[in-house]
Amino acid sequence: MTVSREIDDILQRGADGGRITPEEALLLYTEAPFHALGEAADAVRRRRYPDNIVTYLIDRNINYTNVCVTACKFCAFYRAPKHSEGWTHPTEEILRRCGEAVELGATQVMLQGGHHPDYGVEYYEELFSSVKQAYPQLVIHSIGPSEILHMAKVSGVSLDEAIARIKAAGLDSIAGAGAEMLPARPRRAIAPLKESGERWLEVMELAHRQGVESTATMMMGTGETHAERIEHLRMIRDVQDRTRGFRSFIPWTYQPENNHLKGRTQATTLEYLRLVAVARLFFETVPHLQASWLTTGKDVGQLSLHMGVDDLGSIMLEENVISSAGARHRSNLQELIGMIRSADRIPAQRDTLYNRLAVHHTPADDPTDERVVSHFSSIALPGGGAGRSLPLVDVN
Ligand code: SF4
């Protein structure tokens, strides 16, 4: 069989919902014609979501501390313990930010922070239960396996106990954060003190078995090979085959500013779009695929809607971690909806579980709240921007 015939056969099988092997995924990633790859991935989206709806979310990423002992080389957010720019926010500050998010229609908060040397399970129990008590309507889609490993170690408890306790305290869903690159070689190169990729997946599997679902992410562009990118997908799919606990996959691109890697390598737009399409074909068991307009820019985010993506992610009322490494893209609710509609899709607001909260069939159905705008880099201010309100909330 010629390579071109082989690629056609794999694309057809993937488009029809059949399983493709990691070797076949690598062949598609490196050799498939771009438009044929996108067409096959979009065929999967159309089959899965024949109503042509592309979703978005309103949420706020709230950071409780930038103090971290793990010192990942790609991270511009953390400060080592005792560093003069290190900060932690009291619960009252976090609740104030949750209140602003609710005011702007957010349905989800993503609480994220560094691996603070003193923060064990007890800290997270207090944090999550306080948020749930004050704002029971907010879904807590937060932290990641790295934080769970860290808190279990600080408190001297098993992973199962840590997960059970933070779930009981209010954690609804685990963010896919910290996946970076899961294969050993690239992971050790960029995050030598972080847990292994296998360990990251083990925590996810334990959580899934306790009924706590999650997302999965991938950070592209820190010098990993094409084969290592596909291996990352394989490692996630193997767990998904056992648990079905990953709701979505979210690849994003490494941002080059203010970190030790200094942007020596970065993923190109084409590499990102090809990976998105291959992921759509490879993950026949993962329901959703999310674009990362914050890191790739809005144009590429919109283009990804033609490569199998069914979700444009969040407006992100606040984001500091990726922004501090150079992501400068901002948007507002009207623009995000416009990006979806001008890609010939029907926009709909969703919640964490992808339930559709409002479908905007025509512009007459669009929300009109002009205050829903993305903000970032409050950490550029002393104390992590403590006490500072979202400017557009202040207006009202
Ligand atoms: S990515 Fe997370 S774990 Fe790594 S240094 Fe930054 S805050 Fe710490």
Image (cartoon, helix red, strand yellow):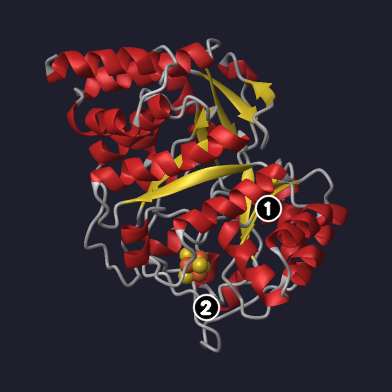
Specify the amino acid type for callout 2: Val
Residues under labels 2 and 1: Cα distance? Answer: 34 Å
Q: Which badge, 2 or 1, comes first in the chain's sequence?
A: 2
Under circle 2, the secondary element is loop
Under circle 1, the secondary element is helix
Binning the other alpha carbons within 10 Å of mark 1 as few (below 14), some (14 to 19) or many (20 upward) gives few
Return the residue nearer the eye: 339 or 214.
214
Q: Is mark 1 within 8 Å of ligand 1?
A: no
The quadrant holding residue 278 is top left
Tell me, yes or no, if residue 352 can be seen here. yes
Measured as percent of width and height from the top left, residue 370 is found at 60, 39
Measured as percent of width and height from the top left, residue 189 is found at 32, 66
187 to 371, vertically: above or below: below
Return the residue nearer the eye: 343 or 307.
307
| Quarter that holds the N terminus | top left
| Horizontal arrangement in the rendering, residue 320 relative to residue 212 (left or right) | left
Q: Is mark 2 within 8 Å of ligand 1?
A: yes
Please name the residue shown 29% across and 18% down the image. 10
Residue that numbered label 2 is attached to: 69
Q: Which mark is residue 393?
A: 1
Query: Pointer 2 and pointer 1: residues touching (CB < 8 Å)?
Result: no
Specify the amino acid type for callout 1: Val
| Horizontal arrangement in the rendering, residue 241 relative to residue 122 (left or right) | left
Please name the residue shown 26% across and 43% down the image. 227
